[in-house]
Image: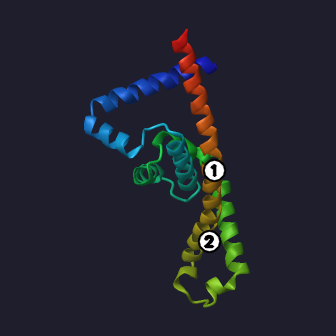
Amino acid sequence: MLNAILVRIRAMRWRAHAWLARHPRLQHLLQDRGVIRGGSESIARGVAIGLFIGLTPTVGFQTMLILVCCLLVAGNFPTAFVASFVTNPFTVAPLFWAYHELGRAVFTVFPVLSSDPDVWYLRGVGAEIVFTLTGSLLIATPVAVIGYLLSRPLSAAILAHRRRRIAERRGK
């Protein structure tokens, strides 16, 4: 089964490379910005971007936001795209509920944020949106930082292992 998955991944990679070969300007832009480069720093940035965008309520715009962020900070887009799947149809409802409850708790514990009961952002639906956004940012930010810090040495070790294996194959 794993072999079949690897074969499909290789086929998808080949199709992506063939598509990029037909669009040399785009390929050049993506390679120059590091969006499709596979260094450990680029991969770690991609993980952080994917986790951050994936854990914010941006459903429907995630791929576009991930691509823009990867272009801005030279993050690996495929890694970011995969990391953003932390939210999926099974996890989105519980995550949004947790964001809302955390945001509501923050505004309850720290009334300085809402000292005036007539502030525009705490009326009706505005309050629900503010609670959800606040909670999502409080969760997404540390998770993205931890993802970056953990993925950088891990990806460096995996890439070094891959280079050693390639060198051993060439040496035979």
Residue found 40% across the figure and 50% down from its top: 71
Instruction: Decide if residue 31 is in sight here.
Output: yes
Relative to 155, residue 71 above or below? below
Q: Nearer the viewer, residue 27 or 130?
A: 27
* Closer mark to the observer between disc 2 and disc 1: 1
Disc number for residue 137: none
The N terminus: image quadrant: top right
Write the residue at 67% across / 61% down. 97
- The colour scheme used here is rainbow
Q: Amino acid at mark 1?
A: Leu
Q: Position of residue 40 (x, y in %)?
A: 54, 41
Label 1: state its secondary structure.
helix
Of callouts 2 and 1, which one flags the residue occurring earlier in the amino acid sequence?
2
Q: Toward the viewer: 90 or 147?
A: 147
What residue is at 27 percent from the left and 30 percent from the top?
A: 22
Mark 1 highlights which residue?
149
Q: Is residue 25 left or right of residue 60?
A: left
Percent x, y of residue 50? 54, 49
Depicted 154 relative to depicted 58: above or below? above
Q: Please give the name of the residue rendered at 65% of the width and 59% of the height, measured from the top-left corner.
A: 142
**Front residue (pair 122, 113):** 113
Q: Circle 1: is it few (<14), some (14-19), or many (20+) Cα within 10 Å?
A: some
Q: Residues within 10 Å of mark 2 (few under 14, many from 20)?
A: many
Task: Give the amino acid at mark 2.
Answer: Phe
User: Which residue is disc 2 drawn over?
Assistant: 131
* Image vertical order of residue 20 relative to residue 140, above or below: above
Q: Is residue 63 left or right of residue 105?
A: left
Whole-percent x, y for residue 154 in the image: 64, 39
| Residue 5 appears in view | no
Image quadrant assignment for residue 116 = bottom right
